Image: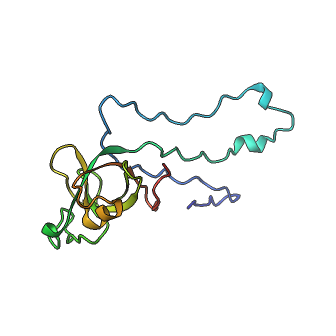
Amino acid sequence: MSAEHPEAGVAQTPAPVPKVAVPPQRAGKPAKAPLADPPRSEATETEDTVPEARSNPAPPTAPSRAQADQVGLASWYGGKFHRRRTASGELFDMRALTAAHPTLPFGSFVCVRSTVNGRTVIVRINDRGPHTGKRVIDLSRAAAEELGMIGLGLKPVELFALQDGERDCPEP
């Protein structure tokens, strides 16, 4: 949504949306490089170039989401914790698509993708955990069923923190 300037109907660009902080994936992994504009050469500038087009460039494209924000093992929890209070204060419902994460804000959404079978599920963070080992997320029973991990206990996954309003998993 953009606000209009009262003079001459000039549109202002919206404030940038803050990214959700996610812990680093692994030590030693290179950071994502920002997208850069391709170098311009004089050959691309012609007499036919409209000055307005250069002063009002197209909005930048969204960065590729091919790289996960976090990679590790997922676990799940169910009946033993059903209807108990979560760290956010709500009652845990093992049939809801929710999860526990150590640092993501309560109410944020995360796409979880199995690296074994490629299945995905979007969960809402409402609890803190996991509290053991190298696990990156604890899923509700319903979310674990979506990923096909009931009976496995642990499954390797990729996590993609979703921005406000985003409700689709990125393409692999």
Instruction: Give whichever of 81, 124 is nearer the camera.
Output: 81
Does the rendering let one see residue 68?
yes
Query: x, y (%) of residue 84?
Result: 14, 70
Residue at the outermost top position: 42
Residue 166 horizontal side relative to residue 20, left or right: right
Q: Is residue 133 left or right of residue 160?
A: left
- Residue visible at 40% across and 57% down in the picture: 119
Residue at 57%, 34% (x, y): give it.
Answer: 36
Q: Nearer the viewer, residue 98 or 37?
A: 98
Q: Is residue 107 visible?
A: no
Indicate whether 40 appears above or below 85.
above
- In this orientation, which residue lies closer to the viewer: 145 or 74? 145
At x 38%, y 60%, the residue is: 121
Q: Determine the image quadrant of residue 10.
A: bottom right
Q: Is residue 28 left or right of residue 169?
A: left
Q: Residue at x 13, y 67 (%)?
A: 80
Up-down relation of residue 25 to residue 77 (above or below): above
Residue 8 at x, y percent in the picture: 71, 58
Quadrant where the N terminus is found in the figure: bottom right
Compared with residue 29, is residue 129 higher up or lower down, i.e. above or below?
A: below
Q: Whole-percent x and y of residue 88?
A: 21, 64
Q: How many marks?
A: 0
Q: Position of residue 141 (x, y in %)?
A: 25, 65
Question: Which scheme is used to colour this image of the protein?
Answer: rainbow
Q: Residue 76: name its quadrant.
A: bottom left
